[in-house]
């Protein structure tokens, strides 16, 4: 599958899941919701490890890669998800998800600074659309 197809599938999944999470958070605190989500992640990892055993995967990985991936997982899947659940519990799923979805804007600027990525007209148009969309939802 091509990168665009993978990204589109990601968007479909990430667009659907907040509905499940909003329903799930209706009777619990966000902290408890985070625990339940982690059980789902762990179950998925066990299932995937059964289908595609990792064997020597960690030995192939250098410490720098492991650190950045593990730290990214902690920040996104624990801290970010906790903060997202706080917002989702209190707000409308459509608005919270849209505002949280401006992360490409943050990534764009950070990638310019830290990864020396280029500025293109299509990227600038996309950024303008993201900003305009968030302004409409406010």
Image (cartoon, grey):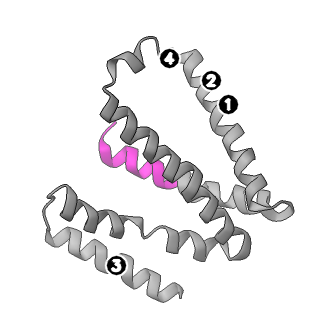
Which one is in front, 121 or 54? 54
Q: Dot 3, how many residues are within 10 Å of its Cα: few (below 14), some (14-19), or many (20+)?
A: few
Provide the secondary structure element on which disc 4 rests.
loop
State if disc 4 and disc 3 touch (CB < 8 Å): no
Tag 3 near tag 2, CB within 8 Å: no
Please give left or right for residue 114 compared with residue 62 in the image: left
Neighbours of disc 2 within 10 Å: few (<14), some (14-19), many (20+)? few
Q: Earlier in the sequence, mark 3 or mark 1?
A: 1
Q: Tell me residue 81's x, y (percent).
A: 59, 56
Q: Where is mark 1, residue-wise?
A: 43
Mark 1 crowdedness (10 Å alpha carbons): few <14, some 14-19, many ≥20: few
Residue sitting at 34 percent across and 70 percent down?
Answer: 105
The residue at 36%/64% (across/down) is 104
Residue 59: where, in percent of width, then height? Answer: 37, 16
Query: In this rendering, would 110 be left or right of 85?
Result: left
Q: Residue furthest right?
A: 27
CA separation in Å, label 3 and label 1: 37 Å
C-alpha separation, residue under disc 1 versus residue under disc 4: 14 Å
The residues bearing labels 2 and 4 have C-alpha atoms spaced at a distance of 9 Å
Mark 3 highlights which residue? 129
Q: Nearer the viewer, mark 3 or mark 2?
A: 2
Q: Which mark is residue 47?
A: 2
Q: CA distance from mark 3 to mark 2?
A: 38 Å
Q: CA distance from mark 1 to mark 2?
A: 6 Å
Q: Are marks 1 and 2 in contact (CB under 8 Å)?
A: yes
- Is disc 2 placed on a helix, strand or loop? helix
* Of callouts 3 and 4, the N-terminal one: 4
The earlier-in-sequence mark between 3 and 2 is 2
Q: Secondary structure at mark 1?
A: helix
Q: Are marks 2 and 4 in contact (CB under 8 Å)?
A: no
The magenta stretch spans which residues? 1-12
In the rendering, which numbered label is found on residue 52?
4
């Amino acid at each position: 599958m091509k990168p665009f197809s993978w990204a589109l599938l990601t968007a479909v999944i990430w667009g659907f899941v907040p509905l499940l999470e909003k329903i799930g958070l209706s009777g619990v605190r966000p902290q408890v919701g985070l625990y339940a989500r982690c059980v789902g992640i762990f179950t998925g990892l066990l299932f995937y490890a059964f289908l595609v055993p990792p064997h020597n995967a960690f030995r192939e990985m250098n410490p720098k890669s492991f650190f950045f991936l593990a730290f990214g997982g902690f920040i996104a899947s624990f801290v970010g998800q906790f903060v997202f659940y706080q917002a989702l519990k209190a707000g409308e799923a459509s608005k919270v998800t849209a505002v949280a979805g401006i992360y490409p804007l943050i990534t764009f600027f950070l990638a310019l600074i830290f990864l020396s990525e280029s500025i293109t007209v299509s990227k600038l148009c996309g950024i303008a659309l993201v900003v305009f969309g968030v302004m409409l939802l406010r």
